[in-house]
Amino acid sequence: MPDLIDLLKKAYSEGNRYNHERIYDVSEGVVAKSFITQHEAIYEFEFGRELHSKGIQVPKMIQVEGLEFTIALKNYYDLWFLLMQKIKGMTIGNIAEADRSDAYRQYREQIGKVLDMGINPIDSDWHGNSMYDSDEKKLYLIDFGQWSRIGTATDLESERERVSGPLAFRYNRMSI
Ligand SMILES: Nc1ncnc2c1ncn2[C@@H]1O[C@H](COP(=O)(O)OP(=O)(O)OP(=O)(O)O)[C@@H](O)[C@H]1O
Ligand SMILES: [Mg+2]
């Protein structure tokens, strides 16, 4: 069985993406999200690990790995990768009509639990930041890169209000 890091190097060098330009298809059960800095990769890894350990529906975090690539004799660049469980599903804005109410119910429930932990799940309303596996009938929150414990009680309350009302996931963050 090849080592996970060898598989990561292979996926990166062959450009094997999974759903998104930042996400590499490492193996049957594992993807890697790319980061420019180690700090960002670790921030998301630590958040994900804590959330998973507290029973929040998020992908299981595996490890953070840095890779260095040589361009010419003296030129190189490095990239950081967060290896995590591959979610075999669709982003919440793209799921089948039949699954929508269950996905939204789970989304509300999971965001409610995150808020109860005093965490502000910033950006979670972006439709690409949660995925629904329609075989498992399970919703996963993903992308904790901007989540924060710094939010005030008012921030948390307004987020709680947003999820309790009709959910309208933004479809394209480029159009303001
Ligand atoms: N663990 C995972 N398993 C499967 N697909 C994933 C996983 N994590 C991310 N993806 C896919 O990659 C997309 C982008 O992931 P993520 O939101 O973490 O990165 P991003 O740079 O914030 O992208 P965006 O700005 O589009 O939200 C997700 O919408 C999803 O389709
Ligand atoms: Mg995102």
Image: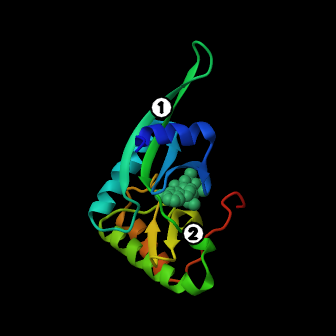
Label at residue 18 = none
Q: Is residue 154 visible?
A: yes
Residue sitting at x 41%, y 72%: 111
Pick the front one: 143 or 6: 6
Disc 2 CB within 8 Å of nearest ligand 1 atom: yes
> Is residue 102 or residue 40 the one in the foreground?
102
> Where on the image, by quarter, is ligand 1?
bottom right
Q: Can you tell which quarter of the image residue 151 is in?
A: bottom left
Q: Is residue 41 above or below residue 113?
A: above
Residue shown at 59%/12% (left/top)?
73
**What whole-number distance in Å separates the C-alpha atoms at marks 2 and 1?**
29 Å
Point out the image quarter for the N terminus: top left
Q: Quadrant location of residue 169?
A: bottom right
| Residue assigned mark 2 | 90
Q: Amino acid at mark 1?
A: Leu
Residue of label 1: 67
| Farthest-out residue, left | 54
For this orientation, the residue located farthest to the right is: 175
**Crowding at label 2, few (<14), some or many (≥20) Cα neighbours within 10 Å?**
some
Query: Mark 2 belongs to which amino acid?
Result: Met
Name the residue rendered at 62%, 40% in the picture. 14
Q: Say which element carries label 2.
A: strand
- Residue 39 visible at all: no
Residue 107, percent from left and from top? 45, 75
Please tell me which residue lies in front, 89 or 50. 89
Residue 100, above or below 46: below
Give the residue at x 36% y 50%: 62
Q: Residues within 10 Å of mark 1 (few under 14, many from 20)?
A: few
Residue 168 is situated, as x and y percent measured from the top left of the image, at 60, 76
Q: In the drawing, does residue 107 fall left or right of residue 46?
A: right
